[in-house]
Image (cartoon, helix red, strand yellow):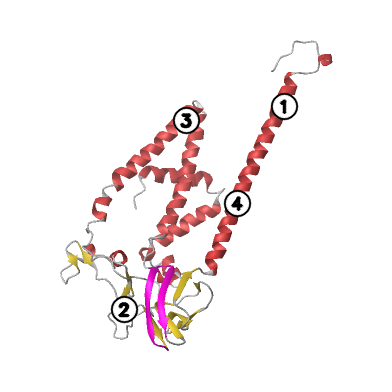
Amino acid sequence: MYVGVLPVLLFMLGAACRSRRHRTLALCVLIFLWLSLGFRSEPFSLWALVHKIPPYNVMRTAERFRFIFMLGLAIFAGAGLEEIRQLLSRKMKERQADFLTYGVVLLILADLLYVNTPVFKDAFPIPPLELPERGEFMQISGWPNYDENGPETPYSDQMHLTYGAGFPAFLTNRGTILSYESMPLPANALPISSPEYRGEVFLEGTTGKASYSLWTPNRLVVDLEASSKGDLIINQNYFQGWVVKGGGETKSVRGLLAVSVDPDIKRLELYYRPPSFVVGALISLSSLLGTLVWVLMAYRFKKKRNSGTEANRVTNCFPPREETDLPIACL
């Protein structure tokens, strides 16, 4: 985690000048720095305590807290740079002080690019795999890890090996049951290698056939022919939020997504729209409208204030004739 010497010095200056005024921010910076050290700060490791509390107990590493720490560092570094700019503006012209401040920012940017850019040469050493053509969607148990030489072997270097292969599975239209997830998730869907696998969509409690007409992560279209009432089973985990277009209800059968069907139903369309999405969309829309109204009111207020200031200035420039015999002038 390289941030540069100059940003650290500016951070120290900004913290020394502004930490009393922004105690909460300064405290957050210290806390997240302490957390980002992980177990390296034992026997006084804050991460060792936090890691026992859900949902932090499923986090693999503590280094992610560095991003929050660096945000606080950047804020205080900006405050330190502002202190320097104000000091320079008292000793020289305002524009000269601004140009020197911009120069410091460009110097920091150049240093970061010079030091961090070579990292990208070693960041992606594994070339893309040669994958089969994209076919119909199906669930698989997983995709083997791989390196630049291909799938993992007993001789593969663990330091240069992929940790999971969800992206190749995505490119080939495959769902991976055993994905590299640190958070425990239910895995009720069956892979094609399972002896109990009956297809991605199938009928239960009746005879007939069913097949996908369309599969996307949040929209499913299934063609079916059922001889009697029964259930359409979809080989993926059941979650609340799936809606049947045109009516009907989804349900869970052995943890899988299911819908009751009858011989009159020839096509089913399902889409995923949980209530949380609707609530979140309404909140986002309300926030956007509120922001637009606030910006418009602020603009009108500023315009009205400027018009009042201009009217006062004009009035002061043209005093009544009877009050003075001096020449009219704007001071």
For this rendering, which residue is in front, 329 or 18? 329
* For discs 4 and 1, the disc positioned in front in the rendered view: 4
Q: Earlier in the sequence, mark 4 or mark 2?
A: 2
Looking at the picture, which amino acid does disc 2 mark? Pro
Looking at the picture, which amino acid does disc 3 mark? Ala
* For discs 4 and 3, the disc positioned in front in the rendered view: 4
Element marked by disc 3: helix
* For discs 1 and 3, the disc positioned in front in the rendered view: 1
Q: Which mark is residue 118?
A: none
Q: Which mark is residue 311?
A: 1
For mark 4, does the 10 Å Cα neighbourhood hold few (<14), some (14 to 19), or many (20 or more) residues? few
For mark 2, does the 10 Å Cα neighbourhood hold few (<14), some (14 to 19), or many (20 or more) residues? many
Looking at the picture, which amino acid does disc 1 mark? Ala
Relative vertical location of residue 254 with respect to residue 13 in this rendering, above or below: below
Residue linked to disc 2: 191
Q: Earlier in the sequence, mark 1 or mark 3?
A: 3
Q: Which mark is residue 97?
A: 3
The answer to if 220 sits in the magenta stretch is: yes
Range of residues picked out in magenta: 205-226
Q: Main secondary structure of the magenta part?
A: strand
Label 1 to label 3, Cα distance in Å?
Answer: 35 Å
Looking at the picture, which amino acid does disc 4 mark? Leu
Q: Which mark is residue 289?
A: 4
Element marked by disc 4: helix
Q: Earlier in the sequence, mark 3 or mark 2?
A: 3
Instruction: Decide if residue 185 is in sight here.
Output: no
Residue 3, x across and y down, in percent? 36, 48
Relative vertical location of residue 287 with respect to residue 278 in this rendering, above or below: above
